[in-house]
Image: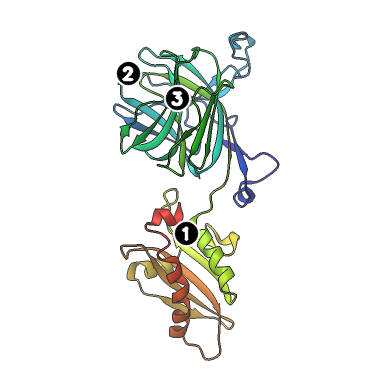
Amino acid sequence: MTFRLVGGLCLAACLSLAAAELVFDLTAEKPGTIPAGWRSALAGEGPPGVWEIRLDAPAELATPAAPGAASGVVRPVIAQVSTDATDERFPLLIYEPEVFGDFVLRLRFKTVAGTREQMAGVAFRLQDERNFYVVRASARGNTFRFYRVFEGRRDAPIGPEVTVQPGVWHDLEVEARGNKFRFRLDGREPIPELTDNTFRAGKLALWTKSDSVTYFADLRVSYTPRVRLAQRLVDELMKKYPRLLGLRIYATTVARPELHVVAASNPADVGLPGGEVERAVMETLTPYAGRTRKKFVTTLPLQDVNGDAVAAVRVELTASPGQTEVGAVARARPIVKQMQGRFQTRQELTE
């Protein structure tokens, strides 16, 4: 999948700006495959869904007045094509590279087939397959509903009966601002603004139910990029300590399980692989110190609330005359100590 950020912005630049937009371009994707960056998952019971790229009539043509099929023009869409009719079965296609806090998601969907159900929806603020919000439309039941899934249990759905015509494209918009949510279906707002404080951020996913065969197209997300806590800590400490020459935090993430730089005073360092020093510091909880002519480089473990090392912090300080390696570690400890207590788990620090 190709990701286009509108306005001529690149991904690296957008991560540091107040707002960004992801446009999911499927034209380079191979039909019959899952789009790059997405992962198939399942909430509920039964087998997982089957998600793939398919070719279909353009969404802007596929309306009741102009079905589009006769035009002979096709383009790629994301399709859930499994017809397993397990009732409490909710196939998910999760977008893995980004965690979204505030966002507006716009897409089009078409329910194609289904004997038990014909549904299309979006799961958002998704923590895992047991914790998320859902908004969905049903072409068989002619309903538009929102609900929360918490620890695997579904709340009572909220929303009215509306006409959702099968076999044609519909516009869906999901807006999340803080703890407030708004939903639009074909330009209308069938559900009044809702408020919930359970999930403040999470991943986005396409959602269906049971044997629903559903197509999705024209996905676009406007969002406020989230800055990792690790990076915020680095930025704060670099401002607080003018004699600091540099900071790096090495850790693992869900998307990249090997040790690497997750935050740094120099943006170009983010993503660099960790080495033997960082791994040894985390495994033994023993600081490391080395000196060049102008600076001391020390690496200390960063521990969570249980005392487990979840990261290694490299601290670069100006070298003072006569200072020893022990003294350099002593200078670096207060800096690292200020990071501890600001998070409880590695995930809070790095995701």
> Can you say whether 32 is above or below 65 in the image?
below
The secondary element bearing badge 2 is classed as loop
Q: Disc 1 to disc 2, how far (Cα)?
A: 43 Å
Q: Which of marks 1 and 2 is nearer the N terminus?
A: 2
> Which amino acid type is marked by label 2?
Ala
Instruction: For label 1, count other residues whose C-alpha is less than 10 Å away and answer few (under 14), some (14-19) or many (20+).
Output: many
Q: Quadrant of residue 197?
A: top left
Q: Are marks 3 and 1 in contact (CB under 8 Å)?
A: no
Which of these two is toward me, 271 or 94? 94
Q: Mark 3 points at which residue?
A: 136
Q: Mark 2 points at which residue?
A: 85
Residue at (56, 24) in percent of width and height: 76
Q: Residue 260 carries which label?
A: 1
Q: Do the residues labelled 2 and 3 touch (CB within 8 Å)?
A: no
Residue at (34, 30) in percent of width and height: 155
Nearest to viewer (mark 1 / mark 2): 2
Residue 190 location (% of width, % of height) = 51, 22
Q: Disc 2 to disc 3, how far (Cα)?
A: 18 Å
Q: Residue 49 carries which label?
A: none
Q: Which of marks 2 and 3 is nearer the N terminus?
A: 2
> Which amino acid type is marked by label 1?
His
> Which amino acid type is marked by label 3?
Arg
Residue 33 location (% of width, % of height) = 47, 29
Q: Earlier in the sequence, mark 3 or mark 1?
A: 3
Q: In which quarter of the image is residue 293?
A: bottom right
> Can you say whether 43 is above or below 314 in the image?
above
Instruction: Please give left or right for residue 196 compared with residue 152 in the image.
Output: right
Instruction: Please give left or right for residue 226 compared with residue 251 in the image.
Output: right
